[in-house]
């Protein structure tokens, strides 16, 4: 049972380049999330999707777009990467959103030079 | 005021010690309380989950919630080197999709 799978594990981008971070879950969960984790800042919510077909902004959405491709997959796109987006990105899923524990992937470590 | 405050540590204890990790929160609407453990270069994993005041025990771990004081704690008994990790508290506001995390406390248990 894989749980939440994120690809790639590592990525280096130049300023201005674009990329998409992929996330898939095999637990039949309804809700999916993207967080970023920075030293001293903790985990901050970028976007979430309460159910297939819906997405909402979190605490730090600027510079990002998301797509809930289907119930299993939720992608995060950086259209024009900036050094401030250097971070570790975590995808998570939960069974039904509010009150349901989140299950996390192992992260994508992104460096923007 | 931050919604969830957690002392970042670091905290270093000898093997076998009792560890106490704490968070305070500001919003009385918060209802669901969790503790996550995060090993280096891994994602957070759920350790404890509770939604009521009082204690919840699971093996060597006890989660304690005091809603009147807006204070939550995680106790680790007989701590082991394998408990060395960062511990994050996380709280859901009732009816909200938003899970708010503390910044995490880094714990090292020395053999």
Image (cartoon, rainbow, N blue to C red):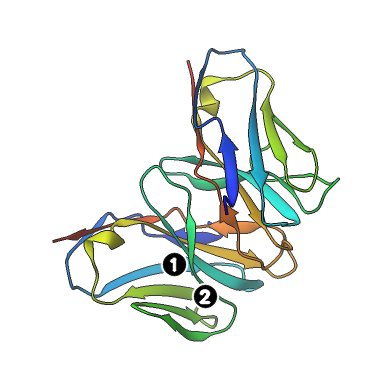
Instruction: State how far apart marks 1 and 2 are (Cα).
Output: 8 Å
Pointer 1 or 2: first along the chain = 1
* SS under mark 1: strand
- B11 up-or-down from A92: above or below: below
Of the pair B49 and B52, the residue shown nearer to us: B49
Q: Which mark is residue B100?
A: none
| Residue A27 % position (x, y) | 67, 57
Which quarter of the figure has residue B100? Answer: bottom right
Who's the residue at 36% across and 59% down the image? B7
Who's the residue at 68% across and 37% down the image? A61
Q: Chain of mark 1?
A: B
Q: Chain of mark 2?
A: B
Instruction: Determine which residue is flagged by label 2.
Output: B70
- A6 up-or-down from A86: above or below: below
Is disc 2 on the same chain as disc 1?
Answer: yes
- A33 up-or-down from B76: above or below: above
| Residue B30 % position (x, y) | 63, 70
Inspect this view and state whether residue A63 appears. Answer: no
Q: Which mark is residue B23?
A: 1
Which residue is situated farthest in the right direction here? A53
* SS under mark 2: loop
């Amino acid at each position: 049972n894989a749980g939440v799978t994120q690809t790639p594990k590592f990525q280096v981008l130049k300023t201005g380049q674009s990329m998409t971070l992929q996330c898939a879950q095999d637990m039949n969960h309804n809700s999916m999330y993207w967080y970023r984790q920075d030293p001293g800042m903790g985990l901050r919510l970028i976007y979430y999707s309460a159910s297939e077909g819906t997405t909402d902004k979190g605490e730090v959405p600027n510079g990002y777009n998301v797509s809930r491709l289907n119930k299993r997959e939720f992608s995060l796109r950086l259209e024009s990467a900036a050094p401030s987006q250097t971070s570790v990105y975590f995808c998570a899923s939960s069974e039904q959103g509010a009150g349901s524990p989140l299950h996390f992937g192992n992260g994508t470590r992104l460096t923007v030079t | 005021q931050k919604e969830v405050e957690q002392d970042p540590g670091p905290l270093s204890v000898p093997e076998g010690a009792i560890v106490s990790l704490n968070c305070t929160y500001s919003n009385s609407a918060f209802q669901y309380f969790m503790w996550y453990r995060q090993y280096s270069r891994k994602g957070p994993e759920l350790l404890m989950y509770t939604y009521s005041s009082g204690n919840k025990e699971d093996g060597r771990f006890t989660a304690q919630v005091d809603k009147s004081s807006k204070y939550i704690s995680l106790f680790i008994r007989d701590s082991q080197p394998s408990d060395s990790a960062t511990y994050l508290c996380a709280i859901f506001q009732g009816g909200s999709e938003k899970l708010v995390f503390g910044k995490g406390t880094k714990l090292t248990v020395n053999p």
